[in-house]
């Protein structure tokens, strides 16, 4: 099953991390897209605090956060 996609490009923090947290309650794997540089700090911190695995890939002008339950 593909990850649940959450596109937060154009939104400033805390919105990307809030949308990720909401999706984490309902899904076991998430692909979060974010272009706010603060998300590079906040989203990994959320994943670590929640015990989720995370992989971050930087694309052209945004980052892809691949999150999944451990």
Image (spheres, helix red, strand yellow):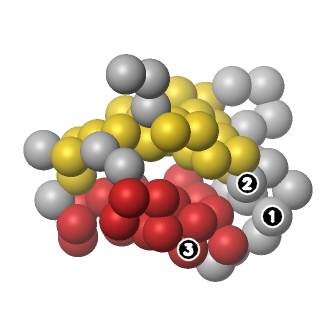
* Residue that carries the numbered disc 2 in the rendered image: 8
Residue depicted at x 35% and y 39%: 29
Q: Secondary structure at mark 1?
A: loop
- Residue with the mark numbered 3: 18
Distance Cα–Cα, label 1 vs label 3: 11 Å
- Can residue 20 be seen here? The reply is yes
- How far is the residue under mark 3 from the one under mark 2? 10 Å
Give the image location of residue 69, x and y in percent: 21, 46
Q: Residue at x 62, y 47 (%)?
A: 6
Query: Which element type, helix, strand or loop, lies under badge 3?
Result: helix
| Relative side of 42 to 11, left or right | left
Real-space Cα distance between discs 2 and 1?
5 Å
Answer with mark 1 or mark 3, whichever residue precedes in sequence: 1
Q: Quadrant of the N terminus?
A: top left
The residue closer to the viewer here, 53 or 39, is: 53
Label placed on residue 56: none
Residue position for label 1: 11
x then y, percent, for residue 41: 49, 62
């Amino acid at each position: 099953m593909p990850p649940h996609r959450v596109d937060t490009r154009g939104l400033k923090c805390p919105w990307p991390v809030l949308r990720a947290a909401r999706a984490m309650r309902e899904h076991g794997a998430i692909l979060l897209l974010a272009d706010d540089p603060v998300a590079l700090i906040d989203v990994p911190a959320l994943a670590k605090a929640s015990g989720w695995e995370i992989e971050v890939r930087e694309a052209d002008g945004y980052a892809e956060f691949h999150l999944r339950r451990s």
